[in-house]
């Protein structure tokens, strides 16, 4: 008698993103509630919560058209988001390196004309 272990929130998010990337389609909530349990093993009760967390994080787009909400996410958007993030991090790294170099130079300038003293402990 083995109990089936549930999926973690991160696993559910990854599997839901796989649905969007594999199908490259637009879904309504009721469609996702039918598809996710069958294809990816995500319980129907948690589909709405997982989908909302993906929308909140900007990984899935949501648009209200009439009385319906439509959800979609395409692989190209994820790629562009990662590229933008990489560019931002690289620029922050180069700024940090420049600041480090300028601080090192100012330390060297401050050391000129000074001599280190040795404290004598009595």
Image: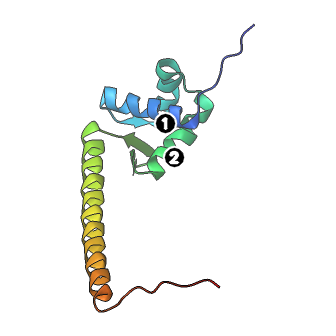
Q: Which mark is residue 13?
A: 1
* 44, 9: nearer the viewer: 9
For the point 45% across and 33% down, which residue is it?
14
Residue, far top: 1
The reply to whether dot 1 and dot 2 touch (C-beta < 8 Å) is yes
Q: Quadrant of residue 3?
A: top right
Q: Position of residue 105 (x, y in %)?
A: 25, 79
Categorize mark 1 by other alpha carbons within 10 Å: few (<14), some (14-19), many (20+).
Answer: some
Whether residue 21 is situated above or below residue 118 in the rendered picture: above
The quadrant of the image that shows the N terminus is top right
In the image, 1: left or right of 47?
right
For the point 50% across and 18% down, which residue is it?
38
Residue 67 visible here: no
Categorize mark 2 by other alpha carbons within 10 Å: few (<14), some (14-19), many (20+).
Answer: some
For the point 55% across and 34% down, which residue is it?
47
In what element is the residue under mark 1?
A: helix
In the image, 80: left or right of 57?
left
Q: Position of residue 58 (x, y in %)?
A: 40, 51
Residue that badge 2 annotates: 53
In the image, 80: left or right of 34?
left
Colouring mode (rainbow / by chain / secondary structure / one colour): rainbow
Residue 24 visible here: yes
Q: Earlier in the sequence, mark 1 or mark 2?
A: 1
Whether residue 55 is situated above or below residue 96 in the rendered picture: above
Residue, far right: 1
The quadrant of the image that shows the C terminus is bottom right
For the point 59% across and 28% down, which residue is it?
7
In the image, 25: left or right of 58?
left
Q: Position of residue 102 (x, y in %)?
A: 26, 78
In what element is the residue under mark 2?
A: helix
Q: Position of residue 50 (x, y in %)?
A: 53, 39
Whether residue 88 is situated above or below residue 78 in the rendered picture: below
């Amino acid at each position: 008698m083995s109990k089936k272990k549930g999926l973690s929130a991160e696993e559910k998010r990854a599997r839901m993103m796989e649905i969007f990337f594999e199908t490259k389609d637009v879904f309504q909530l009721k469609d996702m509630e039918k598809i996710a349990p069958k294809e990816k093993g995500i319980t129907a009760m948690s589909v709405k919560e997982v989908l909302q967390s993906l929308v909140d994080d900007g990984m899935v787009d949501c648009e209200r058209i009439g009385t319906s909400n439509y959800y979609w996410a395409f692989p190209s958007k994820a790629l562009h988001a990662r590229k933008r993030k990489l560019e931002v991090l690289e620029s922050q790294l180069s700024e940090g390196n420049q600041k480090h170099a300028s601080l090192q130079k100012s330390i060297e300038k401050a050391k000129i004309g000074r001599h280190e003293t040795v404290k004598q402990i009595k």
